[in-house]
Image (cartoon, grey):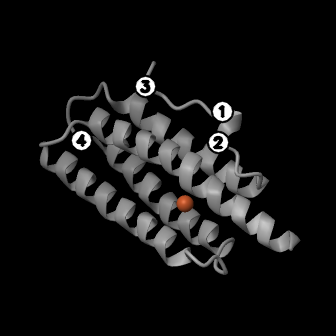
Amino acid sequence: MPNKIKWLAEYSVNNVAIDDQHKYLFDLCNILYILVEQPVATQSTKEALLGLTEYIAIHFHEEERHYKEHPLFADHQELHQDFVKQINGYIADYNKGTLKLIELADFTRDWLTDHITVIDRQYFRDMIWSSQV
Ligand SMILES: [Fe+2]
């Protein structure tokens, strides 16, 4: 399945607990790719989407604890909030039948990988650096 996310070393933020949470988010996203074959919303897809959104909320809350002291904390929190709004919009469209599950899965995959690589890694680097000065 070519669309699935595979964990790569370059995604590590050098925090084992957060890396494990990111890996679990990848697993939840990869479940969507298993479900894309189903033509309409089913109980399994609804449960998978609920599980994904619930875990995203838990993860963002936990991740944000790590850089509360970062001068650009609010910017990062806003990115998380925007993503939550976007994914809820995608889920609403999917439930209405106007969006395919593959589009939702691809959006989730692309957002997660971009965000972790660019934003999360930078913030965790900054916090490690600031704790050493
Ligand atoms: Fe983040």
Which badge, 3 or 1, is on the more N-terminal residue?
Answer: 3
User: As shown in the figure, which amino acid type bears the numbered disc 2?
Assistant: Tyr
Q: Position of residue 33 (x, y in %)?
A: 40, 30
User: As shown in the figure, which amino acid type bears the numbered disc 4?
Assistant: Ala
Q: Secondary structure at mark 2?
A: helix
Which badge, 2 or 3, is on the more N-terminal residue?
Answer: 3
Which badge, 3 or 4, is on the more N-terminal residue?
Answer: 3
Residue shown at the point (86%, 74%) measured from the top left: 133
Q: What residue is shown with label 3? A: 3
Contact (Cβ within 8 Å) of mark 2 with mark 4: no
Q: Where 10 falls versus 67 (above or below)?
A: above
Q: Position of residue 35 (x, y in %)?
A: 37, 32
Q: Position of residue 43 (x, y in %)?
A: 32, 45
Front residue of 132 and 36: 132
**Which numbered mark, 3 or 4, is in the foreground of this view?**
3
User: As shown in the figure, which amino acid type bears the numbered disc 1?
Assistant: Leu
Q: Secondary structure at mark 1?
A: loop
Q: Position of residue 126 (x, y in %)?
A: 70, 65
**Which numbered mark, 2 or 4, is in the foreground of this view?**
2
Q: What residue is shown with label 4? A: 41
- Determine the CA span between mark 2 and mark 1: 6 Å
Q: What residue is shown with label 1? A: 8
Badge 1, how many Cα within 10 Å: few under 14, some, many 20+? few
Contact (Cβ within 8 Å) of mark 2 with mark 1: yes
- Determine the CA span between mark 3 and mark 4: 20 Å
